[in-house]
Image (cartoon, helix red, strand yellow):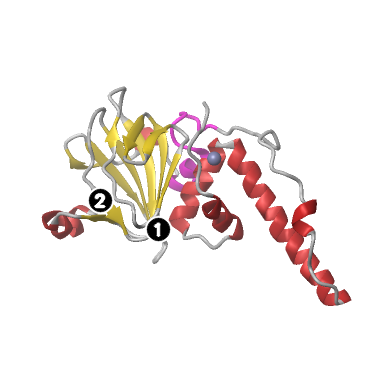
Amino acid sequence: MTIRHHPHEETLLAYAAGTMMPALSALVACHLALCPRCRAEVRRMEMIGGALLDRAREAALSGKAVGGVLSRLPQASPEAGARPRPSRQGVLPGPMTRHLGMDIEDIPWKELAPGVEQFKIKMPRRGGDLRLLRVQAGRKLLRHGHYGSELTLVLKGAYRDETGEYHAGEVADLDEDIEHRPRVTDDGECICIIAGERHPRYKSLSLRLLRPFYGY
Ligand SMILES: [Zn+2]
């Protein structure tokens, strides 16, 4: 499996710095379980963070300026510590199975529309919005935007939208200003994890009014 779509560098940096909302952070952890390249990158960022702190401490003690740390740090290598950790069933990544305490076949899906089911994952207050979505082959979702950024990690199947085509293991990292209408490819059902700072923003007034009842 070649992963072509990864989270943006700023997203990985926020994850490494621990400044990310729990919902978004959970999704990145799931991607890292599947992607050796991003695991190596996050490890490198954590080392930079640690090295900068060490240098700052030294500088504070010796009175010298902090400098030259970045140029001496090792480069990320996709091979470094590559340990693929697929879940038992091969669909839910390890961190998600552990968080939910169940595997894909035990998920109590709730139908949103014909061929579209979701499972909303309980998050702490202000922890963001995290959900699993299962969509049948060929189905189109409604056009929507977002309040804040939205991350989607494909676990099974594939979908495409205005920004590209996403397959298992790949992440769509969308900014607030992007509106899109995802469509699942005809090859089979698509299961993905979607994390947002808040719920999706639908254009249609009737959908906005129904949202509290259906929780989409
Ligand atoms: Zn990656």
Q: Which of marks 2 and 1 is in front?
A: 2
The residue wearing badge 2 is: 144
**At label 2, which amino acid type do we have?**
His
Q: How crowded is mark 1: few (under 14 residues within 10 Å), some or many (20 or more)?
A: some
The residue drawn where x is 19% and y is 59% is 212
Quarter residue 125 falls in: bottom left
Q: Is residue 47 above or below residue 112?
A: below
**At label 1, which amino acid type do we have?**
Met
Left or right: 117 with respect to 154? left
Q: Identify the residue at the far left of this view.
A: 206
Q: Is residue 125 above or below residue 167?
A: below
Query: Tag 1, which secondary structure?
Result: loop
Give the percent coordinates (x, y) of residue 81.
69, 37
The residue drawn where x is 21% and y is 45% is 142
The residue drawn where x is 58% and y is 55% is 13
The residue drawn where x is 26% and y is 27% is 137
Mark 2 and mark 1 lie on one chain; the one further toward the N terminus is 1
Magenta residue span? 86-100
Give the percent coordinates (x, y) of residue 15.
55, 55
Query: Tag 2, which secondary structure?
Result: strand
Mark number for residue 123? 1
Q: Identify the residue at the far top of this view.
A: 187
Whether the residues at callouts 2 and 1 have beta carbons within 8 Å, the answer is no
